[in-house]
Amino acid sequence: MRPFRFVRSTCSLLVLAVASTQAPQSAQAQDWVNAKDRKTNQSSFRAIDEWPDPNEYRNAAGAPGPKYWQQQVDYAIKATLDTVAHAVTGSERVTYHNKSPDALSYIWFQLDQNIERGDSRAALIAPALPTRIPEQARRFLAPEAFEGGYDLTRVQLVDARGLKKDARYLINGTVMKVHLAAPLAPGQSAIIEIDWHNVVPEGGRNARGVKELVKDGWLYELAQWFPRASVYDDVNGWATDQFLGQGEFYLNFGTYDVELTVPRNHIVNATGVLTNPTQVLTTTQQARLTKAWTSPTPVFIVAADEVMTPQSRPAGTGPLTWKFHAENVRDFAWVSSKTYVWDAMGFRYRPTDKPIELHSLYPRDAMPLWDSVSTKAIAQTMKTYGRLAFEYPYPKAVNVHGPVFGMEYPMIAFCGARPTPDGRVTPGLARALISVTIHEVGHNWFPMIVASDERKWTWMDEGINSFLQYYAEQEWDPAYPSQRGPAKNIVGYMRQEAQVPLMTESNDVQTQFGNNGYSKPAAGLVMLREQVLGDTLFDEAFREYSKKWMFKHPQPADFFRSIEEGAGEQLNHFWRGWFYTTYANDQAIASVESQAGDSLLGPSRAGQTYNRITIENKGGLVLPLQVEVTFDDGTKELVKLPADVWRKNELKFTYGFFSTKTVTQVVLDPNEVLADVDRSNNTWKKPPTIS
């Protein structure tokens, strides 16, 4: 147990630990108190049964075990963008390396673009449109009827001699099962080639890989755009969850070599390093990039007055092919448009480091907002996330403006926010871009590198990322009005009946997905860091978790166990309450009593008063106590008590202490850091003396 801490102290409280006068009992909330059967262990501090037993793959400390394994999948892709038909035609060679201990007879693929089919499962289960749709929400809806999805023109197996044979395959909605010619033994590799064609939607059910018409022309954001091998792991076997739009994706790490053929007047950026800059960039642009890596402020690579001018593109006619190489990434996304302004700068953790390339691409419609904010916000993300988790390991990070307000892929983010039609930029609009940029670039850490299963556990990427975003915003500006992170901002949601636990799979979160997947886990982790464990313990444990699961696939129990192991605290009560239930925190003052000190312990306490503050736990959550005591001379003491006070009785605790002054007021959670949902019972005031 950590020692009690006192702050804002103007007099000393003489603390005496005494046994609670309440009869021992253990209950999570009133619904358990009324239960008839209390013969089993119902303590919030008990072990969590839902956690899988440790094994050789994932150990009891929340780390990869000695036999941890994961598959590797490498891609060689060639694709062409047709800006007349608004379509992508692609061909990929997928090399699947079986590093599992199992022989595999088939390989599952994700076909996320099939969500755009009119008969897709997402379309069939979609509810009717509401009577009114906010303007911002309309961009996520197709402006007209659209029939998308993949047109697969070839699926073939390639044998060791290079001979190709048509594969037997089966499509089930947004997943495809490709049968192999023979079982793929551990340590062996299989090669599959797939050709496809798909039209790029405008809006749609996916609202991730889309196109948009801006003043200067079309821009394209290509994401979840090619058939991708599903994950086979030690927890699920094959991960074949349908893509319904809400749960995002879970993918393998590998190497990508991608060639993208686009109109000559287009600028392209993507996951990975551009390997043929001399063929697709002018000498001026190459020189500007070299300058940018040593510049403390963004440098224009394509300035606003150069957009769509002949000198902004290499001389010649016909399309250009941009080539990118990426290692140890779990996906690949790209953007292409003739409308882009492009600025860049370098970032280093240390002066001797090789610079990390920071890029921003945006149409002129997005100025003057994007050119003043975007790249600087990427740099802030590098600083904060690098300190709290690990230093960014990739060579570049890109932020692109378009119709996708916020979405992330390795090394590249799609963000929204643009000036009003008359060109105004309000402080709120600037903050919107700062926040979404930090959040989406921050997803490079979680889940692009610490690669959790987004189809199942939204809080493991969105929640953890929103938690880190909060600190990046505060470091950008200590007065930043962060929406996610502060405990008091989640109180409204915690009061509601329409909740599901955070440990609900992504597609099964019925309402308020943002509060459930982003805000509540962020607030809980801020609370865990600042109020339960303290910054030092939490930060060390969190960095350990982050680093040991870099480029691997953690599960929820791996996170929980890692934090406990690194911090040296058993936190079952916190995980159970905040993640596995929808209980709220409602701590209430039941009574405040005082008696003469000498009546309790004799003359040694003459002139002192012994005070008892009885606190009830009405909401079910087991959290620490923060008790602010005000005395008759106006001085105050803030007493912080650990959650262990509830071990013997989860419904009521009486705190006792000696003082030389009279208590006039007691307030629970005075700084609103514990998300108390009913503050009407948090304050006691000494009744006035009747003369």
Image: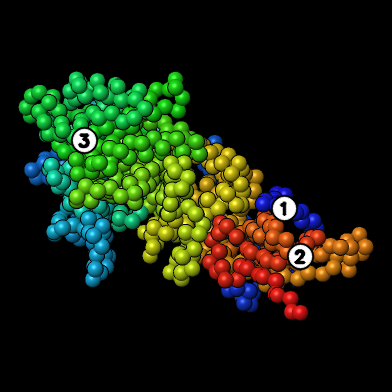
Earlier-in-chain disc, 1 versus 3: 1
Q: Residue furthest bottom?
A: 691
Q: Please give the name of the residue rendered at 41% of the width and 50% of the height, measured from the top-left corner.
A: 462
Q: Front-most of 28 and 56?
A: 28
Earlier-in-chain disc, 2 versus 3: 3
Residue to which mark 2 is pinned:
662
Residue to which mark 1 is pinned:
10
- Tag 2 secondary structure: loop
Q: Front-most of 647 and 419?
A: 419
Q: In this rendering, would 553 be left or right of 588?
A: left
Quadrant in which residue 400 is drawn:
top left
Q: Please give the name of the residue rendered at 50% of the width and 39% of the height, measured from the top-left corner.
A: 388
Vertical side of 201 occupied by 622: above or below: below
Q: In this rendering, would 424 be left or right of 146?
A: right
Vertical side of 463 occupied by 580: above or below: below
Which mark is nearer the camera, 2 or 3?
Answer: 2
Residue 532, position as x, y percentages in the image: 61, 52
Residue to which mark 3 is pinned:
341
Q: Give me the C-alpha separation between circle 2 and circle 3.
A: 67 Å
Q: Is residue 527 visible?
A: yes
Vertical side of 649 occupied by 266: above or below: above
Residue 312, position as x, y percentages in the image: 15, 28
